[in-house]
Structure formats: structure tokens, C-alpha cells
Image (cartoon, helix red, strand yellow):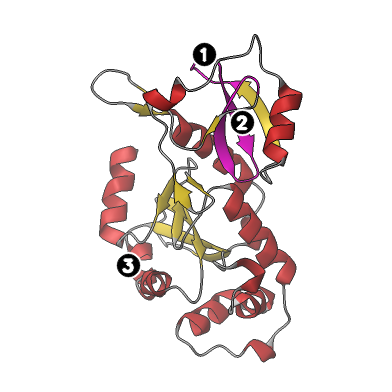
Amino acid sequence: MHFFGRTILATAVALTAFTAAAKPDDAAIKTKLSGLGLAPVSITPSPFSGLNEVVTDRGIIYVSDDGNYFLAGQLYKNDGAQPVNLTEQKMAKLNKVKLKGMEDEMIVYPAKDEKYVVTVFTDTSCGYCRKLHSEMQSYNDAGITIRYLAFPRGGERSRNFAEMSAIWGAKDTAKAMNDAKNGQFDISSTAQREDLVRKHYQLGVAMGVSGTPAMILEDGTMLPGYQPAGMLRKMLDSRS
């Protein structure tokens, strides 16, 4: 996961750096993490003795029983020839739950013969987001419905935060998005929905989105970056 802009890998050597307490001290863990600006949502034992899985408002981290040591990274189970990414599995389950009930807030480009639904965090100033959008017909022809959520990469400080707020405030949001991705959208022609764009951005941060486009599959798995329609369809077929 990305933590404070860096990728930190959890290694077996690092895991030996702390001495486990007798039992998890939830209060100490919450206090220590709050000093880092992190708000724990849940604290549960991880499969690794003395290390706890802590779901925060910025993703999952692993914390010692006394809260004095933490790891930001992916936890794998060495299960034979193919290691299992336990962090990714847990995040996928959380992501799927978080997206429930948000369908009415999405800008949807439906496939006529729908086989899969992919939710995409998008930014109108992102080159690869524009590329994806220009190939929308290819995704739809491949049986993939694309649903957009807003993710202005700089948050409310983004230069296009107002543009995305206006897109979500338009009567015809799909047309507004088409115009914006083609550089032809007039933000003064519609109302602003800053509340929705802010909500989507905060959701993306909580789900671990660090760039756009970020694709969320129906099972909650995240695919960072642009994926061509044909390649995406083959990958979805292989997963199903």
C-alpha cells in the first residue's frame, strides 16, 4: 500500500524488530496511530503472532500489540508455490462493501450485452483517464459496463475540482463527462456538486487509490492504471 507517498515492504526481518505484548492494547494502538493522523476502524489479530491487522481511514496497516511498531505493506501467506496476498484479499472485501448503495452517484456507460461491471475512479485532467474514455465503446462492446466515481488527484486543491463538481451537478452527467474528456465542457453551465466529489475522493483514499484511473472489479479487487478493453476482458474471463 502507499503510505505517506512511499511504498514500504513488510519483510520477515522487520517483523522481528518488536517484542509482542501479552495481548493487544487497543487503546494504546489507537493513541499511537492518532498521532500519525490515522483513525482505526477495526483492530483484529493478524495470522502473524503479535501483529494486528488495523483497518484505518487510509487502508490497512499492521501494528504490534503495544502499538509501538507498525508496518505499512502487503502481508502474504506462503502457501506453497503461489503466495497469497492477505492484505489484497481483505481490502477487496472492504471495497466491495463500501461501493454498495453508491450506484446512483456514479456516471454509468452501460454495455448492451453486459458481462462485467467495473467501477473506475477517474480524473478529467488525467491523460490515461482520457484514453480510457475515448475507448469507451470498446469496453462496452467487450461486455464491460464502466461506472465512474470522481477522484481529483489533488483533492479540493485540484485545479479541476470545480470542473468535476460541475460534471456531477449536470442534468446529463454522461454528456458532461464526454464534453469534459474532450475539453469542451463549460463549468458555468451547470450547478456544482462539491459534496459528491469530495465524498468520492475521500472514499478513494480510504480504498487505497493513489492515482487514476483506478479500476475496482465486482469482487472489490483494485487494478491500478489503464487497462485496454481486450486485455481487461481476458483478465475478467480468467478470474471468473
Residue contact at pointers 1 and 3, CB within 8 angstroms: no
Above or below 112: residue 208: above
Q: Residue 2, image x and y in percent? A: 48, 48
Q: Residue furthest top?
A: 22
> Residue shown at 48%/17% (left/top)?
48
> Which residue does the numbered mark 3 point to in the structure image?
138
> Residue shown at 51%/84% (left/top)?
179
Q: Residue 203, image x and y in percent? A: 63, 53
Distance from disc 2 to disc 3, alpha carbons, whole Å, reads 40 Å
Above or below 98: residue 199: below
Disc assigned to residue 49: 1
Q: Which residues are magenta?
A: 45-66
Residue contact at pointers 1 and 2, CB within 8 angstroms: no
Distance from disc 1 to disc 3, alpha carbons, whole Å, reads 48 Å
Secondary structure beneath dot 2 equals strand
Residue type of the residue flagged with mark 3:
Ser
Secondary structure beneath dot 1 equals loop
The answer to whether residue 69 of the structure is visible from this angle is yes
Residue 178 falls within the magenta-colored stretch: no
> Residue shown at 30%/44% (left/top)?
237
Q: Residue 121, image x and y in percent? A: 51, 60
Q: Nearer the viewer, residue 207 or 215?
A: 207
> Which residue does the numbered mark 2 point to in the structure image?
54
Lower sequence index among marks 1 and 3: 1
Residue type of the residue flagged with mark 1:
Ser
The answer to whether residue 76 of the structure is visible from this angle is no
